[in-house]
Image (spheres, rainbow, N blue to C red):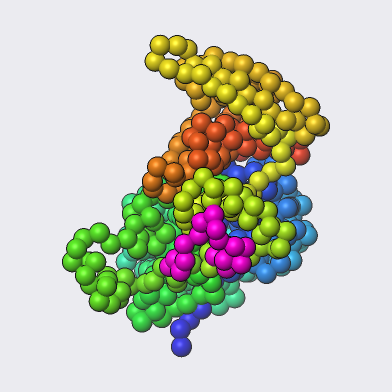
Amino acid sequence: MARTVQIFDTTLRDGEQAPGCSMNLQEKVEVARQLEKLGVDVMEAGFPAASPGDLAAVKAVAAVVKNSAVAGLCRALEKDIDAGWEALSKAAHPRIHTFIATSPIHMEYKLKMTPEQVLERAVAAVKYAKKYCSDVEFSAEDASRSNPDFLCKVFAAVIDAGATVVNIPDTVGYAIPAEFGNLVAYVKAHTPNIDRARISVHCHNDLGLAVANTLSAALAGADQLECTINGLGERAGNAALEEIVMGMRTRKDFLDVECRIDTTQIYAASRLVSQVTGVRVQPNKAVVGENAFAHEAGIHQHGILANRATYEIMTPESIGIPRNRMVLGKHSGRHAFEERLKDLGFTLDAKAVDEFFAQFKVLADKKKVVSDRDIEAMIVGSAAAVPETFKLDRWVVNSGSSLSATSTVRLLHKNGTYHEEVAVGDGPIDAAFKAIDRIVGKQLDLETFELGAVTGGEDAQGEATVKISWEGRRWNGRGLSTDIIEAAIKAYVAAINAMEWELSATNGQRGPNVEEPIGV
């Protein structure tokens, strides 16, 4: 009988720490809901001590998630653990996750502590966390470069102090699969009280081995596997949840491990995380990439037509990608539209279906065929929307090779007043953005701007994503339209709405500087 391992998802914490991947509170809540639907055993919602915004986000996630445990990351400091419990106290299944580095290079140069001091701090942190919470995870940062015997000594001490999970992170992606599996086996064999705690692993992808190391650890006896959607995370990222889970499912014959993830929710989770972070999934990404189930070579197509198993070791349906059963267009009815939503993994109430059906009809008048990608973009784009401080009312641009670009934009404020400004820019989009800056009264920095097509064809919808910053804080925005300029304007306004909403929610507070790296 296959052994069951737990899936610990840290998309909302480690994934969000990747440059440019920040999410606002509402986006975190929507991703958390999808992670719960996916069936993760534990979701790490953030680092509460990092800022008032992060504490509020963890608290919001803890309030809505009922079936998964919710964890908050804390350094081995009482003030961090206090903040962690403040954020997690209302969770149905709270977990405090505390960490300190155990490798010689980290102890000497980063912590400037002796091994004895690190051991003492680790035990004190777990004991302090245990006063608040019965479920406490301890991570030995940079474990893959730590002395194995010291690692076992620390783990034995923190388990005696009350730790229910001990985590072996490959923090800098240094390990090789056979080596990492051996380390897990060594810890399992040489930590005398290891039977009283779950062994977890947390692998980074600096050498492209995060998933391989994680699966090697599972073979060696790890009980919990830490990962992120789409492999997001610090530097080169973390082990990708979708690759770990489908690896276990596809090669259960060899690995003999399983988990409780609903794999049909994988694609929806991948799309949602991609949309809210503005980080596109590379086309050749394993499992969820655009080309993962595409077959162009003639010999491959011939094999697929004869038997899909010739070139597909898993099916699109297994991760939640349905094969189109019917074409949707302007003559399609509500029932057909609602069935397609169910096929795509979206569970919506009647009011939401009515609203999206109305949007579908508007889009269908502009396009001959509305694809699954169009519908996904429409639903996912609205899922994590924040309250609208500003709404685009109308816009006009004038541009050409022989004249300066000018734009007039009119926005409707939530108080019912209209605001209109004109600006000149280096191009139509720059001019429109400058006009919007004048309306909101802030000089915003545009950090990134990306424009792509949801599908192919002349009538494809344009999908714009932007990242803006103001006073050191960043926000994402996304816009969708068959007109690329309008898509860009909508994305910019969406980012501004995220900014206005978050600033009002936190009263403009900024978080303290965190001296140690946030992560394991």
At 50% from the left and 40% from the top, the residue drawn is 482
Name the residue at the front extreme.
Answer: 331
Q: Is the magenta stretch mostly helix, strand or loop?
A: loop
Q: Is residue 491 visible?
A: yes
In the depicted structure, whether residue 387 falls above or below residue 68: above
Q: Does the magenta stretch include residue 49?
A: no
At 55% from the left and 33% from the top, the residue drawn is 486
Q: Position of residue 385 (x, y in %)?
A: 66, 46
Name the residue at the bottom extreme.
Answer: 1
Q: Where is residue 135 in the image (x, y as percent from the top left)?
A: 67, 66
In the depicted structure, whether residue 510 falls above or below residue 222: above
Name the residue at the left extreme.
Answer: 299
Given residues 368 and 115, the one toward you in this image is 368
Quarter-of-image position of residue 295: bottom left
Given residues 50 and 236, the one toward you in this image is 236
Q: Is residue 187 visible?
A: no
In the depicted structure, whether residue 225 falls above or below residue 361: below
The boundaries of the magenta stretch are 322-340
In the depicted structure, whether residue 218 falls above or below residue 24: below
At 51% from the left and 19% from the top, the residue drawn is 398
